[in-house]
Image (spheres, rainbow, N blue to C red):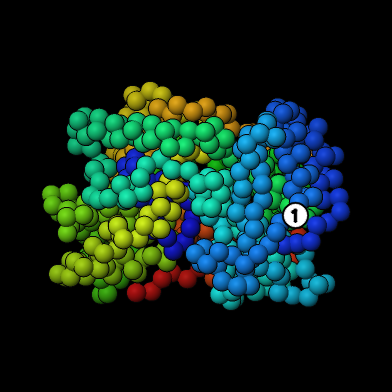
């Protein structure tokens, strides 16, 4: 589910297990949490965690954030500043072990009168870092020029991520080594091998990060988000969540409806309790296949540029041929079917990758394999990147395994994935192996919160493309039903993931209007798609 454009994923969702890859304090800032504690208790059913969260927010409001220049190796240029917010590891025991959450910000660029507070961002995952969000100002992104005049842009590493008490499940260099096992099994022996890897990965998480695992839940991250709000000196939260960030926002708005000022959900995780998380991943398998077909049809239409076939059938046959070649003998000894899948899945994820992947593939077929091999191979020399990749995958696994009860029966996993693979073969088994550690997870698994509207929740904005692969469109419809007063803006016949950062005036003007004025359209809106990539 992760949405972190510009980074190659093994992330949310796919690959073999262990495989693919501010503000000045405002007096009374925590008055709202205290006043609404009883309502929060009723919704969460966890008095001790609710009281702990209120206490943590009060302490954070008093302490504030000691903003300083960011450490040089964080890659965040001035005038971005960094700091820390202290939160309980276990909100039921707020005086016991604490962890520090890394945050960063860049001040609003407008006048004092234009400033509306802080806008906090989460890019998805679980496991994605939001620390690069303020760079939308330093890199002078035109899309965010108006909004940055009104808001400080604030990013953070969620608990377990990056600089925030990071967790790990396996040695990072081992994690990225290739080639991995082919995700698509040819036999029961292949399935047993993958099951063994998944169980070993789950055991590795427990061995390396066991103390953190019971507390790596979305509700706890939502509580952290409220503590960050208080530390920023904000009475209410302005929040932009992408992908998994929409589920984080949905849980936050359920727990803290009166703390929300503005909230945008971009590319929505289906919040139904029976979908989190096993069924969500099955839905992705089908959606990824559809979007892969969209891309291959586009490749066929541009055969004059790529020479991979002028029909979808021909292009798909080229993919199967490439896959079979790599299965027989991994390209350059490292790029097998798993590595190809990990690289090619970027195309259904983001159409900004369409040209790059098709070009590298075209060169391979034409006799120049180097660009494709380099793009799909791990870089063992990039130790920092590999640490980040392994950490992101560990957090993804820990949060999804802790958030919900997962099927323990291998027969159910086998039956469901065998059925879906018949019509959606591209990602199904890879996705299954990535999530299978949750079947043997030894740490406590919670029950998902029932997302919905409670008194005090203001209007929210939901942005979704109809052909999104990672977060299929029905998820946005479901959240829209559950959040009274929300407005759904649909980008029709498009499928990129994370659309608030794409150039499409129909979308961009509505994001600006909502963040700057709080206003939404009188009814739901359908936008034409953003421009299709050109070779």
Label 1 SS? loop
Residue 302, percent from left and from top? 30, 71
Q: Nearer the viewer, residue 12 or 72?
A: 72
Residue 475 lies, with reference to residue 97, above or below; the image says below
Which quarter of the image is occupied by the C terminus? bottom left
Residue 500 coordinates in the image, percent (x, y): 57, 62
Mark 1 burial class by Cα count in 10 Å: few <14, some 14-19, many 20+? many
In the shown orientation, is residue 57 left or right of residue 248?
right
In which image quadrant can residue 142 be found? bottom right
Q: Does residue 158 appear anywhere in the picture?
A: yes
Q: Quadrant of residue 141?
A: bottom right
Q: Quadrant of residue 199?
A: top left
Residue in the image at 71% along x and 70% along y: 108
Is 295 placed left or right of 453 in the picture?
left
Report x, y in % for residue 45. Answer: 70, 27
Q: Residue at x 61, y 43 (%)?
A: 99
Residue 417: x and y in percent read 34, 34
Q: Residue at x 34, y 40 (%)?
A: 17
Q: Nearer the viewer, residue 100 or 326?
A: 100
Residue 424, compared with residue 193, is above or below; it is: below
**Residue of label 1:** 64
Residue visible at 27% across and 58% down in the picture? 377
């Amino acid at each position: 589910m992760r949405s972190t454009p510009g980074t190659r994923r093994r992330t949310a969702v796919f690959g073999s297990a262990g495989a693919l890859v501010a503000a000045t304090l405002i007096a009374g800032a925590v008055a709202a949490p205290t006043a609404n504690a009883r309502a929060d208790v009723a919704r969460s059913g966890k008095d001790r965690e609710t009281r702990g969260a209120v206490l943590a927010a009060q302490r954070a409001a008093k302490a504030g954030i000691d903003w300083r220049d960011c450490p040089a190796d964080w890659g965040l240029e001035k005038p971005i500043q960094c700091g820390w917010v202290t939160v309980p590891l276990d909100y039921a025991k707020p005086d016991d072990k604490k962890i520090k959450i890394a945050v960063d910000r860049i001040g609003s660029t407008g006048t004092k009168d234009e400033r509306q507070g802080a806008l906090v961002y989460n890019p998805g995952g679980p496991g994605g870092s939001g620390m690069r969000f303020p760079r939308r100002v330093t890199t002078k992104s035109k899309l965010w020029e108006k909004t940055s005049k009104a808001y400080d842009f604030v990013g953070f590493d969620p608990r377990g991520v990056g600089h925030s008490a990071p967790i790990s499940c396996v040695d990072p260099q081992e994690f990225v080594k290739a080639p991995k096992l082919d995700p698509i099994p040819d036999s029961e022996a292949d399935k047993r091998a993958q099951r063994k890897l998944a169980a070993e990965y789950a055991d590795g998480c427990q061995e390396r990060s066991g103390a953190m695992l019971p507390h790596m839940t979305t509700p706890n991250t939502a509580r952290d988000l409220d503590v960050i709000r208080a530390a920023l000196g904000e009475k209410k939260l302005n929040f932009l969540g992408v992908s998994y960030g929409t589920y984080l926002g949905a849980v936050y708005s359920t727990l803290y409806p009166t703390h929300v000022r503005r909230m945008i959900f971009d590319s929505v995780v289906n919040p139904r309790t029976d979908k989190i998380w096993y069924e969500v991943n099955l839905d992705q398998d089908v959606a990824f296949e559809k979007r892969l077909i969209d891309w291959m049809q586009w490749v066929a239409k541009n055969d004059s540029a790529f020479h991979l076939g002028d029909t979808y059938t021909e292009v798909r046959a080229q993919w199967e041929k490439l896959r079979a070649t790599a299965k027989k003998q991994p390209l350059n000894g490292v790029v097998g079917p798993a590595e190809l899948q990990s690289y090619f899945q970027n195309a259904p994820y983001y159409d900004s990758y369409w040209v790059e992947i098709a070009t590298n593939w075209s060169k391979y077929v034409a006799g120049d394999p180097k660009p494709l091999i380099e793009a799909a191979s791990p870089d063992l020399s990039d130790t920092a990147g590999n640490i980040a990749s392994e950490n992101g995958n560990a957090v993804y696994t820990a949060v999804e395994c802790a958030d919900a009860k997962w099927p323990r029966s291998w027969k159910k996993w086998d039956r469901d994935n065998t059925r879906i693979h018949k019509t959606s073969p591209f990602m199904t088994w890879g996705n299954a192996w990535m999530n299978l550690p949750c079947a043997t997870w030894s740490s406590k698994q919670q029950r998902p919160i029932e997302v919905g509207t409670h008194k005090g929740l203001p209007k929210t904005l939901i942005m979704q493309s109809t052909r999104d692969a990672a977060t299929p469109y029905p998820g946005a419809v479901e959240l829209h039903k559950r959040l009274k007063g929300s407005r759904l803006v649909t980008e029709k016949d498009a499928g990129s993931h994370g659309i608030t950062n794409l150039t499409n005036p129909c979308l961009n003007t509505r994001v600006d209007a909502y963040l700057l004025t709080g206003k939404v359209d009188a009814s739901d809106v359908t936008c034409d798609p953003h421009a299709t990539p050109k070779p």
